[in-house]
Image: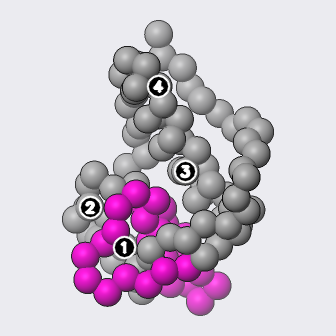
Amino acid sequence: MAILVNWFEVTFDRKEITLPFLTCPSWEASTSIIERYPDMEVVRVRQADQTIRLYFITGRPEGEASEETMSLGGPRAIAARLIEHNLAKHFEKLGARVVVNHR
């Protein structure tokens, strides 16, 4: 049986998280970087100056990555990916086969 998990309320004890990130000039340029890290959870966020930040939810990119401490109330995609990843790991430990298809 497949279950589609949608939005539900989650309360965090911590209000901030520090994540490594890389900055790319465009969405297209960021795609090749994401493809280099197929086993890592990466979230793309467009910045006000139209550059793209790749936030690494799991793992750390090779080379010169910066870090940012951000509010979990910030970009919704980051909190959503954190929840999705941890929920998937929880169900896998219980023996479920989890398929995440966001790429």
Query: Who comes first in sequence, dot 1 or dot 2?
Result: 1
The residues bearing labels 1 and 2 have C-alpha atoms spaced at a distance of 11 Å
Q: Give the residue drawn at x 60%, y 76%.
A: 69
Q: Give the residue drawn at x 40%, y 79%.
A: 22
Residue receiving disc 2: 37
Q: Few, some or many C-alpha atoms within 10 Å of disc 4 (few <14, some 14-19, many ≥20)?
A: few
Front of the two marks 4 and 1: 4
Residue receiving disc 1: 30
Residue receiving disc 4: 91
Query: Who comes first in sequence, dot 2 or dot 4?
Result: 2
Query: Who comes first in sequence, dot 4 or dot 1?
Result: 1
Type of amino acid under label 3: Leu
The residues bearing labels 3 and 1 have C-alpha atoms spaced at a distance of 20 Å
Q: Which of the numbered marks, if any, corresponds to residue 17?
A: none
Type of amino acid under label 4: Phe
Q: Is residue 73 visible?
A: yes
Residue receiving disc 3: 82
The residues bearing labels 3 and 2 have C-alpha atoms spaced at a distance of 17 Å
Query: Who comes first in sequence, dot 3 or dot 4?
Result: 3
Type of amino acid under label 2: Tyr
Q: Which percent across, then down, holds residue 100?
A: 41, 37
